Amino acid sequence: MTLCSAYLPDRRTGPGRLSEVPLEVLAVGPAELVLPEATIRDERGGVLLDRGLVVDPSNGGGPLGDGDQDRAARAFGLVNVAFHTQRALRAVTELLGRPMPHLVVRIGMHDGVRRWGGGHYRVPARSSDPVETVAVRPTGEVHLGGGSGFAAADGGGTYFAAPSHNLAIIYHEIGHHICRHTADFRLNRLRPAHAQTNKKVAIDEGTSDLLTAILLNTADIYGWHRGSVPDWDLRRRQLDPRWTMAHFRGGRSDPHAGGTIWASAGWTARERVAEAGYDPARFDRMLLRGLSLSAAEAGVGLGVSARIGVQPDAEVTEQTLRRRRHFGVLLEAMLRADPGLAGPVLAGMAEHGIAPGSTNAELREVARGRQLVAVGG
């Protein structure tokens, strides 16, 4: 173990509490860290880690900082991502009882004429937007931009919003890796290794947000860089009790918005579990094991037959994919994973209009009907 710099979540406005934390490292390159669970690399190159892993974040660096500040900020981003990647993947291994495939995280992607301030999870696909300039591993990768724009700094001033400094973005994209290798909502295990799909659906986005909230221990996961978005706006993606299936649109709408409803329901269910006297980690285990059980239901096992590019019995059909999108299907799998939590989990989900055994459209119609009755008095 060695010490490195990282932000720890502290619920204040800003990137977090700057700390020195332990990190298990197998190898250190000029702009790369190899961990047992992941490889973290800054694709912009240069020598970043020659002064060690305890680095100043330099307010994110960026275009307003000088060369030394930007170099320090990039170095900090690399070790910050490494720490939180290791933390997230080790937490999943402990709860699930098996590790995720080795993850590659590339920082500074799509950093051309127009800076990119986001992140995404990518598998090899026939097409992608933006176009990937590197070959993506069949088991999936996290790509983070170099940053664009500014956010408020803790205590005043501005902070260059580099995704590698943003815990919510890091955890959300790792959440997609976890979903890919548990529930596999898009059934990529059944597709040819280099012709998978990067399309995300609401339940994938929502589960990634729920995992982010669990790791950050807050419902306002994007409160730092989306602080200007009102908390009553779905674009804030705050896991709020107000979001129910009455707000669900589906179809071609933004899957992040629909995912916020599922994530909010999961957060409420986790709170009900804690209020009932159970360890919240039991809900976390229920969620992860439910994700795996939902894959088994679709004929996507976790053994040799489920290796990428190897066809098991199931097929990728629109009907199968559609069923994978339904919140009630994952809820059913979670209840099979831990029937003892059925009471508080069902109660929490019901507050958001989610119940097992129904499609998203059916849940939406019931929730909107109840809303009309309530308004009509």
Image (tube, rainbow, N blue to C red):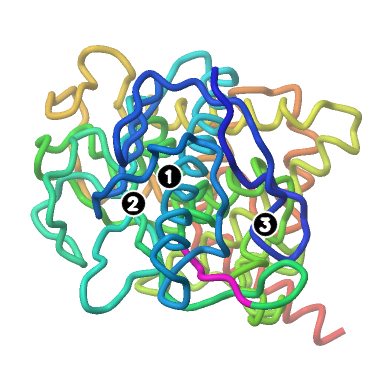
- Residue drawn at x 76%, y 51% as measured from the top left: 10
Mark seen at residue 107: 2
Q: Quadrant of the N terminus?
A: top right
- Residue drawn at x 33%, y 70% as measured from the top left: 116
Distance, label 3 to label 1, CA atoms, is 30 Å
- Residue drawn at x 37%, y 70% as measured from the top left: 251
Please state the horizontal and vertical placement of residue 6, each as a whole percent of the image.
60, 43
Q: Earlier in the sequence, mark 2 or mark 3?
A: 2
- Magenta region, residue range: 158-162
Mark seen at residue 250: none
Q: Earlier in the sequence, mark 3 or mark 1?
A: 1
Confirm whether residue 366 shows in the render. Answer: no
Q: Earlier in the sequence, mark 1 or mark 2?
A: 1
Distance, label 2 to label 3, CA atoms, is 29 Å
From the viewer's perspective, is the residue at label 2 or at label 3 nearer? 2
Instruction: Report the residue that reaches farthest toward the bottom.
Output: 376
Residue 234 lies in quadrant:
bottom right
From the viewer's perspective, is the residue at label 3 or at label 1 nearer? 1
Q: What residue type is disc 1 on?
A: Leu
**Residue denoted by label 1:** 78
Q: What residue type is disc 3 on?
A: Ser
